[in-house]
Image (cartoon, rainbow, N blue to C red):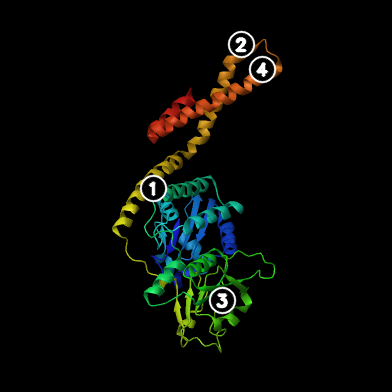
């Protein structure tokens, strides 16, 4: 896998590698058609873009070069922003990521939803494979286990809530103030809810206004997205949080509107609000890179340590699958052979049975015998080191 995130690149770089859902589909389908690629999954959020790929054993691919060339960007200029990982190191990173341990807000929940959405998209367009399916399934499982057993201090905060905290520290007041939230996707809904919890009067833009097919927090007002500039003179705060690749607020759109005291908060990557808005008289602009999070407290450090202990076990489990995955068909073949041998020893005792009875006994014997034999082999696999188990398999196959 390769990844670029808020720790390696500022937003101006990250937005060059951000993918909308439709763009991710095209990229994954293109990569999947590359020789030697078994499967691929792409995760793109406001803070990161990560690409996971399963390859044939004899295949080598420069993923950074592939992404840069696909986006028609310079490999030499952008390679330093990417972090590559292979094998179990890539698995460990995904496990950490799904748990929220790589997020600006440790333990936040939103990333787990995004990880599940990434593998769901790859599955929907047939670009995943068995290895990636197991990897992402285990990542989701261990994340749920950790989140159910460790309640992270100050965890589960959205980027919007962090933005509100930053503004409060700087003297901002939300109670009784009016706020416009541009976007009614997941981030938009989280933002609207955070503002309503702060007792602000919230209006949300929607694109399906006339059909009524929208999902916004109860108590929020709504307007058509195309009416956003008309609403701006009435509000104190403007939060934009869409997944659109297009700008939602531009200096041209703000022409003739008094911006004195208005605060614009851009929670999207690529950015929703033209950076030039921050230079307009009276306006203030905050983006994702301005949302700095304080160092981990002693309690958070202990929570992080406990989570890492559980992740180490998850990595061991994935390693057993990953390094023994080629043995699974061989185990199945041995189990089938054992089941056939069992029936071969039993069928003479069924000489007096009708054909229907013999078939019922044969079917039960083969099914049960094969399952028992396979179960014993998997127990051996989990209890022995890889070399010893491989030798056992060779001996059993000879017999």
Assess disc 1: are there few (<14), some (14-19) or many (≥20) residues with their C-alpha within 10 Å of its C-alpha: many
Is 180 above or below relative to 344?
below
Mark closest to the chain's N terminus, 3 or 4:
3
Mark closest to the chain's N terminus, 1 or 3:
3
Residue 18 in sight in this render: no
Total numbered labels:
4
Is 16 above or below relative to 298?
below
Q: Which residue is mark 2?
A: 349
Residues at marks 4 and 1 touching, judged by CB atoms closer than 8 Å: no
Mark closest to the chain's N terminus, 3 or 2:
3
* C-alpha span from label 4 to label 2: 10 Å
Q: Nearer the viewer, mark 3 or mark 4?
A: 3
253 or 133, which lies in front?
Answer: 253
Mark closest to the chain's N terminus, 4 or 1:
1
Which quadrant is home to the N terminus?
bottom left
The label shown at residue 248 is: 3
Q: Which residue is mark 1?
A: 311
* C-alpha span from label 3 to label 2: 79 Å
Residues at marks 3 and 2 touching, judged by CB atoms closer than 8 Å: no
Q: Nearer the viewer, mark 1 or mark 2?
A: 1
Q: Nearer the viewer, mark 4 or mark 1?
A: 1
Q: Residue at x 40, y 70 (%)?
A: 165
Q: SS class of the residue under badge 2?
A: helix
**Where's residue 213, x and y in %?**
66, 64
* C-alpha span from label 1 to label 3: 40 Å
Residues at marks 3 and 4 touching, judged by CB atoms closer than 8 Å: no
Q: Residue at x 63, y 65 (%)?
A: 214
The label shown at residue 358 is: 4
* C-alpha span from label 4 to label 1: 50 Å
* Identity of the residue furthest to the bottom in this view: 256
């Amino acid at each position: 896998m390769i990844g670029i995130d808020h720790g390696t690149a500022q937003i101006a770089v990250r937005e060059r590698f951000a993918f909308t859902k439709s763009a991710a589909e095209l990229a994954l389908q293109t990569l999947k058609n590359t020789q030697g690629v078994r499967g691929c999954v792409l995760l793109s959020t406001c803070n990161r873009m990560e690409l996971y790929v399963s390859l044939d054993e004899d295949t080598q691919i420069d993923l950074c070069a592939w992404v840069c060339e696909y986006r028609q960007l310079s490999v030499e200029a952008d390679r330093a922003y990417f972090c590559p990982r292979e094998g179990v190191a890539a698995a460990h990173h995904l496990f950490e990521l799904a748990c929220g341990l790589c997020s600006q807000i440790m333990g936040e929940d939103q990333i787990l939803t995004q990880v599940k959405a990434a593998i769901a998209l790859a599955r929907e367009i047939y670009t995943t494979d068995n290895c990636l399916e197991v990897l992402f399934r285990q990542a989701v499982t261990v994340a749920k286990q950790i989140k159910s057993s460790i309640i992270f201090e100050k965890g589960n905060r959205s980027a919007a809530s962090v933005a509100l905290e930053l503004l409060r520290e700087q003297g901002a007041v939300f109670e009784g103030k009016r706020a416009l939230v541009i976007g009614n996707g997941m981030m938009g809904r989280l933002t609207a809810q955070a503002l309503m919890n702060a007792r602000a009067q919230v209006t949300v833009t929607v694109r399906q206004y006339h059909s009524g097919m929208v999902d916004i927090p109860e108590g929020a007002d709504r307007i058509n997205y195309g009416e956003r500039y008309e609403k701006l003179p009435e509000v104190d705060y403007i939060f934009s949080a869409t997944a659109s690749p297009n700008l939602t607020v531009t200096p041209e759109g703000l022409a003739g509107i008094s911006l004195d005291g208005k605060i614009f908060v851009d929670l999207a990557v690529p950015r929703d609000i033209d950076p030039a808005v921050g230079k307009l008289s009276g306006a203030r602009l905050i983006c994702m890179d301005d949302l700095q999070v304080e160092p981990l407290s002693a309690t958070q450090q202990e929570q992080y340590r406990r989570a890492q202990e559980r992740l180490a076990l998850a990595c061991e489990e994935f390693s057993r699958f990953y390094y023994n995955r080629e043995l699974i068909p061989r185990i199945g073949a041995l189990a089938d052979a054992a089941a056939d041998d069992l029936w071969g020893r039993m069928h003479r005792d069924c000489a007096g049975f009708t054909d229907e009875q013999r078939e019922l006994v044969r079917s039960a014997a083969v099914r049960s015998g094969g399952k028992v034999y396979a179960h014993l082999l998997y127990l051996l696999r989990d209890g022995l080191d890889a070399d010893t188990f491989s030798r056992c398999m060779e001996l059993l196959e000879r017999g």
